[in-house]
């Protein structure tokens, strides 16, 4: 079966077509600037990329163009749409009800619409992408794979915030957790590498957005992101966790609204906010190398918070078998991995820098120092494959 994976953003739509016979990617691409002056990039392994401007008024126009390209005699990889057996949709938020990957019917769309208020950024484009795909491919099943659903195993004590309980009942304010599809994928790989189905694993997804998850036997027990992706470790432009009173104090002092405060914490904080240089870890490291003190401080804070979360999860699980690094920074930046793992030998974490610092980009590897109690692994994430696999398993 061939499965199309779709990830719709507010002005973009990413796609990958998988052949589930062997898990290979037949084609993938990206529609950008939807509703503005559309651009499409279409890639097939081993062939030249195709990039063109296009009329992309909305998500429906984008997915129609994608399907035309996939079936195109020259640029395509299938002869007709009927070869696509199912469509998997990445959906950031499944709320409290969509606790596992599910076939999306009218009731599911209605539920996703009902929780847009707690997912205002990612909800509307995801729903619009699903509706568009369903309208042009009405005869196949559409499956939603939710970033939050991996956290359906987290216990109440870890997801209820210590605020008046009625606020949870009234507004569903609780920890949901995000990046679940990525954590689920790399945790499963880690357990495979360890040959241990009950392993205690801490997965660090460190990219533009970063989150850390603790799992036992492939079931999440805690995660650093919360009600929104704002909580947890510092990120490219997000602050991560801060004393909540800092927010209300800033609002009063600067005379800003709640929306403005949210924007400040979401898009002007983190690496960018502290360093004043960039949200991109590579730029901040270069600036640090050139002697920029605030860039060095931004990196120090990042590493400090990540260490604190790792330590707290080891306490929560009463141990850890594997520490895993993934996503842009986690997969590619040996220096950051080294800084995080430094001085954690008490906890059994020690890495071999001969392997770690020389690791080629995108390589799966065991970077553990010989004799260390905890295995430290680098595992490239593949959320799209996980979405394709869930979709395939649900419809086959
Ligand atoms: P997103 O969360 O948007 O998916 P990514 O997972 O692609 O982001 O991660 C982006 C981050 O990864 C950036 O901070 C970037 O600096 C970092 N990164 C990407 N490639 C490298 C690299 N080769 N070395 C160091 N950092 C890298």
Image: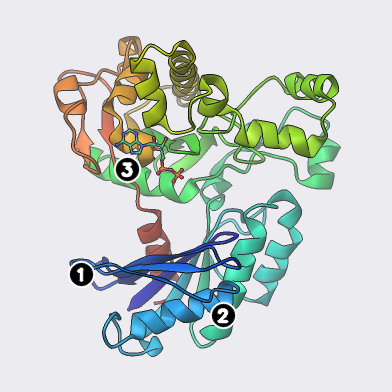
Camera-side residue of 1 and 205: 205
Rendered-image quadrant of the C terminus: bottom left
Q: SS class of the residue under badge 3?
A: loop
Rendered-image quadrant of the N terminus: bottom left
Q: Position of residue 14 (x, y in %)?
A: 45, 63
**Relative side of 165 to 193, left or right:** right
Q: Give the alpha-carbon distance from disc 1 to disc 3, as whole Å.
A: 39 Å
Q: What residue is pinned by disc 2?
A: 134
Other-residue count near label 2 (Cα within 10 Å), few / some / many at <14 / 14–19 / ≥20: some
Within the image, what quadrant is residue 262 found in? top right
Q: What residue is pinned by disc 3?
A: 197
Q: Position of residue 289 (x, y in %)?
A: 33, 16
Q: Can the viewer see residue 234 in this picture?
A: no
Camera-side residue of 64 and 4: 64
**Residue at coordinates 67% horizontally, 61% vertically from top-left?**
124
**Relative side of 170 to 188, left or right:** right
Other-residue count near label 3 (Cα within 10 Å), few / some / many at <14 / 14–19 / ≥20: few
Q: What residue is pinned by disc 1?
A: 47
């Amino acid at each position: 079966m061939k499965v199309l994976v779709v990830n719709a953003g507010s002005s973009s739509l990413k796609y990958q077509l998988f052949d589930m016979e062997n898990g290979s990617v037949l084609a993938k691409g990206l529609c950008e600037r939807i509703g503005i002056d559309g651009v499409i990039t279409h890639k097939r392994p081993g062939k030249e990329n195709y990039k063109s401007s296009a009329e992309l008024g909305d998500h429906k126009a984008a997915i129609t163009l994608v399907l035309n390209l996939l079936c195109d005699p020259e640029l395509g990889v299938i002869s007709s749409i009927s070869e696509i057996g199912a469509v998997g949709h990445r959906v950031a938020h499944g709320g409290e009800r969509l606790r596992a990957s599910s076939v999306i019917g009218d009731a599911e769309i209605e539920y996703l619409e009902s929780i847009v208020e707690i997912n205002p950024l990612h909800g509307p484009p995801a729903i619009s992408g699903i509706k568009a795909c369903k309208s042009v491919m009405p005869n196949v099943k559409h499956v939603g794979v939710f970033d939050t659903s991996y956290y359906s195993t987290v216990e109440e004590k870890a997801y209820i915030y210590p605020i008046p309980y009625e606020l949870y009942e009234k507004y569903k304010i609780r920890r949901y957790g995000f990046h679940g599809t990525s954590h689920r994928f790399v945790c499963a790989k880690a357990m495979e590498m360890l040959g241990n189905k009950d392993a205690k694993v801490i997965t660090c997804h460190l990219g533009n957005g970063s989150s850390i998850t603790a799992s036992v036997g492939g079931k999440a027990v805690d995660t650093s992101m919360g009600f929104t992706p704002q909580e947890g470790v510092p990120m490219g432009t997000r602050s991560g966790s801060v004393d909540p009173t800092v927010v209300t104090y800033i609002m009063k002092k600067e005379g800003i609204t709640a929306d403005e405060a949210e924007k400040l914490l979401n898009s002007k904080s983190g690496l960018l906010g502290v360093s004043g240089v960039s949200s991109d870890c590579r730029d901040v490291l270069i600036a640090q190398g050139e002697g920029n003190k605030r860039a060095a401080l931004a990196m120090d804070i990042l590493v400090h918070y990540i260490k604190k979360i790792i330590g707290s999860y080891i306490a929560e699980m009463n141990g850890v078998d594997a520490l895993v690094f993934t996503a842009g920074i986690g997969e590619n930046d040996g220096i950051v991995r080294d800084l995080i793992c430094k001085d954690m030998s008490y906890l059994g974490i020690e890495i071999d820098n001969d392997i770690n610092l020389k690791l080629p980009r995108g390589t799966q590897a065991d970077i553990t120092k010989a004799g260390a109690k905890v295995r430290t692994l680098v595992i490239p994430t593949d959320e799209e494959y996980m979405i394709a696999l869930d979709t395939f398993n649900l419809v086959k």
